[in-house]
Image: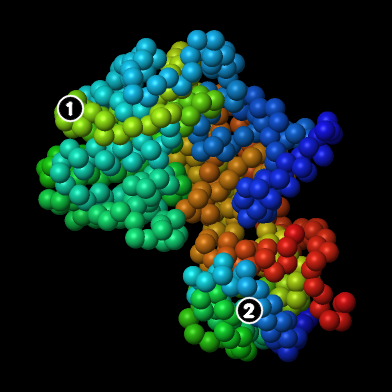
């Protein structure tokens, strides 16, 4: 065993490549994210070698209360003295308390909760519930949407490349363009069980669903007997400046799915929250969805603590204030780097920078990492850099991110103009050579 | 500056190495693409046709409708297909431009990984 950080890192990377996912590691390396995390705290994370980064990935918004929030950790440690995951068939105090809390804080008449482990599972159950409740089969989703990689959710995903290797998937899914009410109107018919949307598309490139669009979907669903599902897995938990992003529109869905920051960045847990009316389906099918680890006692305790912190600290206000600071900086970046930066989008601290080329996503990720900011382009749209820092990010840290963005864009422009000094990686020993160079 | 003939030779070598690599052929068996390769510093133009993971044709000139367009300097093209340099470095420095879907960019890098491991 060694305590040399560089050796520890090299070994971890080698093992990850050898025993987990070599191509993922390679992609991360290209993006400058060949990082093995060590210490993590608040808005920051450190590579084991000591390099500090402001974390603007946060596992797509899973650390809203900050990384390793000490209160969440204390709650978990305390819970470990008395609890384990619990028996999934049974009710429990933590499960009941969290379900009650979710009924209190989610909008309108959302009341009942089915727990799960991750966002994909929450969306899977939402689809099950929609089909089971309406006795209709069709699920409408939107182009470039992302609802997870599990079976039903994958069938509705808006990116062909995720689905194609597994065809045929579950039938009955229909894709329509996002923010296009006319397309939704044409798609929602007598056989439509539900339309499922993210109030802000995350993986799709940080596209904000307009209030009119979400209200229009509600009206269409009411007129045609379909259900409205809001996937708030990324947008929830104060991220956008409200507890839930759909609050901007005032629209109450029939089903809302929640995950990510619900677990305080510490423990996996998700929830599908739905109306009492839809709960009728569970009267006749109480064991229709079982999840061994879903809604574990430990997870529920962690979630309750995370929610307590969000409410007490009014983290939606922090998201709005720091988001406004970012946007003012983005406006200046647009002036300075309009050749490559097209626009910025988002709400609160769910932010996307639209660049002019799909190569800019990986290149920006690489440059930002070099400048001490961990960020990644969106999965379904690589020309968009997604910035989703912890909501506890400070004013000074926002300024640091903006400066890093400025430097990174400047470097890319200099590279494109051929004025940057580029240092190529040395060719690997196994590479071939042009005959005259052998 | 590399000549058209030099790039053709590099591509022929690359084609053979890809086709001889059973692991790569199996991995790419669902990949059928037309690639246009454009040298921006001379008139060199090539088309590579991949069918079911097999590189069927490498020909001079631009033929057919491309799924992927690679544009860079002739030296880079030549070095890349001989394996003298890692194209990812050139892509990330903006010297190599790709018009392709994200999935196809990933596939190209996968070929690179298999043919010329890190």
Q: Position of residue A408 (x, y in %)?
A: 68, 48
Instruction: State the residue in front, A376 or A171.
Output: A171
Instruction: Look at mark 2 in the image and give the residue it sits on.
Output: B19
Instruction: State the residue in front, B62 or B116.
Output: B116
Residue B13 shown left or right of residue A229 in the figure: right
Quadrant for the N terminus of chain A, please.
top right
**Residue B98 visible within the image:** no
Residue visible at 59% across and 59% down in the picture? A359
Residue visible at 16% across and 30% down in the picture? A284
Tag count in the figure?
Answer: 2
Instruction: Look at mark 1 in the image and give the residue it sits on.
Output: A283
Residue visible at 66% across and 48% down in the picture? A19
Instruction: State the residue in front, A97 or A28.
Output: A97
Quadrant for the C terminus of chain A, please.
bottom right
Can you say whether A335 is above or below B47 in the image? above
The lab-note entry on whether marks 2 and 1 share a chain reads no
Q: Position of residue B95 (x, y in %)?
A: 69, 66
Can you say whether B48 is above or below A426 in the image? below
Q: Secondary structure at mark 1?
A: helix
Residue A194 shown left or right of residue B45 in the figure: left
Chain letter of disc 1 in the image = A
Residue visible at 62% across and 73% down in the picture? B22
Q: Position of residue B71 (x, y in %)?
A: 63, 73
Chain letter of disc 2 in the image = B
Rate crowding at label 1 as few (under 14), some (14 to 19) or many (20 or more) other CA atoms within 10 Å.
Answer: few
């Amino acid at each position: 065993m060694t305590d040399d950080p560089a050796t520890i890192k090299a070994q971890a990377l080698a093992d990850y490549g050898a025993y987990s996912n070599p191509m993922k590691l390679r992609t991360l390396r290209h993006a400058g994210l060949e990082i093995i995390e060590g210490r993590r705290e608040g808005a920051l994370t450190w590579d084991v070698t000591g390099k500090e980064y402001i974390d603007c990935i946060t596992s797509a918004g899973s650390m809203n209360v900050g990384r390793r929030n000490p209160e969440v950790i204390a709650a978990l440690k305390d819970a470990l003295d008395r609890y384990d995951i619990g028996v999934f068939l049974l009710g429990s105090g933590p499960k009941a308390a969290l379900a009650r809390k979710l009924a209190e804080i989610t909008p309108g008449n959302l009341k009942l909760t089915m727990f799960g482990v991750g966002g994909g599972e929450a969306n899977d159950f939402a689809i099950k519930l929609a089909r089971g409740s309406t006795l209709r089969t069709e699920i409408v989703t939107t182009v470039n949407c992302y609802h997870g990689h599990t079976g039903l959710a994958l069938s509705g995903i808006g990116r062909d490349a995720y689905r194609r290797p597994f065809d045929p998937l579950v039938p009955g899914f229909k894709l329509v363009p996002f923010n296009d009410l006319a397309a939704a109107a044409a798609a929602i018919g007598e056989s439509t069980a539900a339309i499922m949307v993210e109030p802000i598309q995350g993986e799709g490139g940080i596209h904000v669903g307009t209030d009119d669009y979400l209200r229009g979907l509600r009206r269409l669903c009411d007129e045609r007997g379909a259900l409205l599902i809001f996937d708030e897995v990324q947008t929830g938990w104060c991220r956008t400046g409200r507890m839930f992003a759909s609050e901007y529109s005032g629209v109450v869905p029939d089903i809302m799915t929640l995950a990510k920051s619900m677990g305080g960045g510490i423990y996996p847990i998700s929830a599908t929250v739905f109306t009492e009316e839809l709960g009728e389906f569970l009267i006749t099918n109480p064991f229709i969805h079982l999840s061994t680890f879903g809604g574990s006692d430990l997870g529920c305790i962690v979630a309750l603590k995370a929610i307590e912190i969000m409410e007490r600290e009014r983290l939606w206000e922090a998201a709005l204030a720091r988001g406004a600071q970012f946007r003012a900086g983005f406006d200046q970046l647009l002036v300075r780097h309009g050749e490559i930066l097209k626009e910025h989008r988002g709400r609160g601290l769910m932010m996307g920078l639209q660049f002019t080329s799909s190569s800019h996503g990986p290149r920006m990720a690489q440059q930002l990492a070099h400048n001490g900011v961990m960020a990644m382009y969106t999965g379904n749209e690589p020309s968009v850099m997604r910035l989703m820092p912890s909501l506890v990010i400070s004013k000074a840290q926002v300024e640091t991110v903006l400066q890093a963005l400025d430097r990174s864009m400047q470097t890319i422009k200099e590279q494109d103009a051929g004025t940057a000094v580029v240092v190529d990686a040395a060719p690997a020993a196994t590479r071939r050579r042009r005959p005259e160079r052998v | 500056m590399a000549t058209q003939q030099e790039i053709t030779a590099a591509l022929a070598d690359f084609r053979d190495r890809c086709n001889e690599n059973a692991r790569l052929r199996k991995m790419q068996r669902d990949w059928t693409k037309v690639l246009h390769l454009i040298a921006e510093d001379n008139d060199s133009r090539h088309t590579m046709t991949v069918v079911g993971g097999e590189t069927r044709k490498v020909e001079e000139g631009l033929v057919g409708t491309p799924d992927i367009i690679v544009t860079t300097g002739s030296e880079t093209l030549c070095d890349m297909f001989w394996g003298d340099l890692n194209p990812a470095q050139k892509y990330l420095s903006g010297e190599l431009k790709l018009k392709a879907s994200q999935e196809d960019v990933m596939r190209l890098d996968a070929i690179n990984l298999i043919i010329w491991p890190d």
